[in-house]
Image (tube, coloured by chain):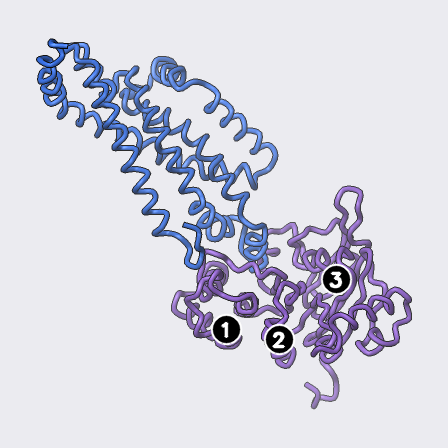
Chain colours: A blue, B purple
C-alpha cells in the first residue's frame, strides 16, 4: 500500500512522457481507419449494387468475395497479404499501406451488406418511377436509389467505423506505428503497463466518440426534410 | 387537315397499339392475351376487380413489367424493348402515374420534375427549372416547389407526379388507379387536373373506379377480369347495358360504391 502511494507520481510521469508519442500514434491510426473506410465505401457501393441488381454470375462472384473477407480472421489476412501475396508478387508496400488495403477490403465486404440492406429497404416504386421517366438503370441507381440508400446507411456506418477503428490495433502485428504498437513499445521499456494501456484505451474511446458524434451530425445535416424520426 | 377533305392517316391510325400481351408468374397466368389500341386524344378507362390484371397490363405497356409475349407500336413504330436505348426513349414518350405516387422522397417537388429533364432530356439547369415551375403551376402547386414529398398531402403528391410526367412531353399517359390511395376529400383535386388533361387532348389509358368521371369523359370503358378483356364499349353501354353478365354485376356494384358522388 505504501509503495503504491509513492509509485503514483511515477505512473503519471510515465504516461505524461509517453503521451506525445502515443498521440502521434493516433494520427497513424486515423490514417489507417480513414483509408480503410474510404476503400470500404467505394468498394462497398458497387458490391452492394451488383448484389442487388446484378446478373446471377456477378452475384455469385460478389458472394464469394464477401464470404472470404468476412470469414478469414484479420490477423491471418494481414499476414497473408503482407508476408505472402505482396512478397510473392514482388510488390514492395509499406506495412501501413498493406494495413489500409486489407482493412479496406474487409470493410468493403461489411459495408456492402450495410448498403444492400438500405437499398432493399427502399420502396420498389422509387426505381419504377425512375425507369418510367426513361432513366437508364445506371442513372436510376445513381440519382434515385443511392442518394436515399446512403442516407439510411449512416447509423450502421458509424458502427462499422468503430469496428474498423478497433481492428486497426491488430495492424501493430505488421509493425505499423499506431496507438497500440507505440503503447506496447513504451510499456515494455518502462514496465508501466497498467497506466499506459489505460491511456491507450482512453484514446480509442475518444476517437470512437468523436467519429460517431461526427456521423450523427452528418446524419442530421443530410436528413430529408419532413421526415420526423430523429 | 379537315379542310383538305380527308382525315390524315395519323389521325385514324392508333397512336399506341398493344397486341396480345401475355404474362405469367410461375404457374399463374396474369395476362392471357390482352390487346388495346388508342387514338390520339382518346381516354380509355380500365375497370375490373383487383387482381384482374389491370395494373400488370399498364406496367407491361411501358415494359416496367416485361411481358412474356406481345407487341407494341407507338405511332406505327414497333418497339424493340430488348434494345436498351430504344426502350428508354420509348418510356420518355409514355408517362406513367402510379397509385402510390412514387415521388422521389429525397427531392423537393421542383427537383422531382427537374431531375429527369436534366439527366434524361439533357436540358440545361435554368430552362429545366423554368419548365418544372411551369408544370407545377399547371397543377396549382407553384407555391409548393420547395416542399419535400413528406411535407405534401396525398393529393398534392399525386399532382406533382402528374406534373413530373407531363414535363417529359409524353405522347400517351398511363394512369394506374391515380386516386385509389387518396382520402375522399383529396380525390377531387386530382380528378380536376386529369379532367384538364382530357380537355387539352392528352391521350390516356386509365385504370380507375371513379365511375362518374369515366361516364362523363371516357371514350371507351374496358372491363378486365382474370387476365382478359371481357367487354368494351362506350361508357353508357358498359355501365348500364352491358352484354356480359359479369360486367353488369361489377358495374352495378361499383356504381353503388363510387357512383353518383361526382
Picture quadrant where residue B44 is located? bottom right
Q: Quadrant of residue A73?
A: top left
Q: CA distance from mark 3 to mark 2?
A: 31 Å
Chain designation of label 3: B
Q: Nearer the viewer, mark 1 or mark 2?
A: 2
Q: Which residue is mark 1?
A: B135
**Is B78 drawn above or below residue A8 in the view shown?**
below
**In this rendering, position of residue B109 left or right of residue A8:** right
Give the class, few, some or many, for how many residues have Cα within 10 Å of label 3's Cα (few <14, many ≥20): many
- Is residue A172 shown above or below B36? above
Residue B219: image location, x then y, percent: 75, 76
Let me know if marks 1 and 3 both belong to one chain: yes
Q: Nearer the viewer, mark 1 or mark 3?
A: 1
Residue at the spot of label 3? B18
Percent of width and height locating residue A138: 51, 48
Q: Who is closer to the viewer here, A198 or B10? A: A198
| Chain letter for the residue marked with disc 2 in the picture | B
Q: Which of the 4 image quarters holds residue A12?
A: top left
**C-alpha distance separating marks 1 and 3:** 29 Å
Residue lying farthest to the bottom in this orientation: B3
Residue hosting label 2 = B188
Position of the N terminus of chain A, as image quadrant, is top left
- A189, B244: nearer the viewer: A189
Looking at the rendered structure, the secondary structure element under dot 2 is helix
Amino acid at each position: 500500500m505504501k509503495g503504491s502511494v509513492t509509485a503514483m507520481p511515477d505512473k503519471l510521469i510515465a504516461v505524461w512522457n509517453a503521451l506525445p508519442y502515443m498521440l502521434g500514434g493516433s494520427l497513424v491510426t486515423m490514417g489507417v481507419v480513414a483509408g480503410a473506410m474510404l476503400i470500404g465505401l467505394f468498394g462497398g457501393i458497387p458490391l452492394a449494387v451488383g448484389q442487388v441488381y446484378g446478373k446471377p454470375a456477378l452475384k455469385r462472384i460478389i458472394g464469394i468475395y464477401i464470404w472470404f473477407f468476412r470469414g478469414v480472421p484479420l490477423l491471418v489476412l494481414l499476414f497473408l497479404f503482407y508476408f505472402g501475396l505482396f512478397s510473392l508478387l514482388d510488390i514492395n508496400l509499406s506495412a501501413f499501406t498493406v494495413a489500409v488495403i486489407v482493412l479496406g477490403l474487409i470493410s468493403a465486404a461489411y459495408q456492402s451488406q450495410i448498403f444492400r440492406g438500405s437499398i432493399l429497404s427502399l420502396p420498389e416504386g422509387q426505381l419504377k418511377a425512375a425507369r418510367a421517366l426513361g432513366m437508364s438503370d445506371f442513372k436510376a441507381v445513381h440519382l434515385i436509389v443511392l442518394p436515399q440508400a446512403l442516407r439510411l446507411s449512416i447509423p450502421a456506418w458509424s458502427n462499422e467505423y468503430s469496428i474498423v477503428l478497433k481492428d486497426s490495433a491488430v495492424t501493430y502485428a505488421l509493425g505499423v506505428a499506431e496507438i497500440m504498437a507505440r503503447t506496447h513499445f513504451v510499456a515494455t521499456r518502462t514496465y508501466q503497463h497498467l497506466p499506459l494501456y489505460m491511456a491507450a484505451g482512453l484514446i480509442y474511446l475518444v476517437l470512437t466518440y468523436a467519429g460517431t458524434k461526427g456521423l450523427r451530425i452528418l446524419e442530421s445535416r443530410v436528413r430529408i426534410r419532413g421526415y420526423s424520426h430523429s | 387537315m379537315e379542310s383538305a377533305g380527308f382525315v390524315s392517316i395519323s389521325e385514324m391510325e392508333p397512336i399506341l397499339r398493344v397486341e396480345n400481351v401475355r404474362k405469367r408468374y410461375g404457374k399463374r397466368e396474369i395476362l392471357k392475351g390482352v390487346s388495346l389500341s388508342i387514338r390520339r386524344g382518346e381516354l380509355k378507362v380500365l375497370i375490373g376487380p383487383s387482381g384482374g390484371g389491370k395494373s400488370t397490363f399498364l406496367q407491361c405497356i411501358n415494359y416496367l413489367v416485361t411481358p412474356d409475349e406481345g407487341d407494341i407500336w407507338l405511332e406505327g413504330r414497333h418497339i424493340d424493348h430488348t434494345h436498351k436505348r430504344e426502350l428508354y426513349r420509348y418510356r420518355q414518350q409514355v408517362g406513367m402515374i402510379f397509385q402510390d405516387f412514387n415521388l422521389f422522397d429525397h427531392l423537393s417537388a421542383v427537383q422531382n420534375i427537374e431531375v429527369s429533364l436534366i439527366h434524361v432530356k439533357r436540358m440545361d439547369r435554368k430552362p429545366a427549372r423554368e419548365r418544372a415551375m411551369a408544370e407545377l403551376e399547371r397543377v396549382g402547386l407553384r407555391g409548393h416547389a420547395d416542399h419535400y414529398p413528406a411535407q405534401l398531402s396525398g393529393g398534392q403528391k399525386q399532382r406533382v407526379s402528374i406534373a413530373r410526367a407531363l414535363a417529359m412531353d409524353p405522347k400517351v399517359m398511363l394512369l394506374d388507379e391515380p386516386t385509389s390511395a387518396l382520402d375522399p376529400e383529396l380525390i377531387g383535386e386530382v380528378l380536376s387536373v386529369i379532367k384538364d388533361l382530357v380537355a387539352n387532348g392528352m391521350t390516356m389509358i386509365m385504370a380507375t373506379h371513379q365511375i362518374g368521371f369515366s361516364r362523363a369523359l371516357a371514350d371507351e370503358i374496358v372491363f378486365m377480369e382474370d387476365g382478359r378483356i371481357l367487354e368494351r364499349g362506350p361508357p353508357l353501354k358498359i355501365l348500364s347495358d352491358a352484354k356480359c353478365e359479369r360486367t353488369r354485376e361489377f358495374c352495378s356494384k361499383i356504381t353503388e360504391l363510387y357512383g353518383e358522388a361526382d
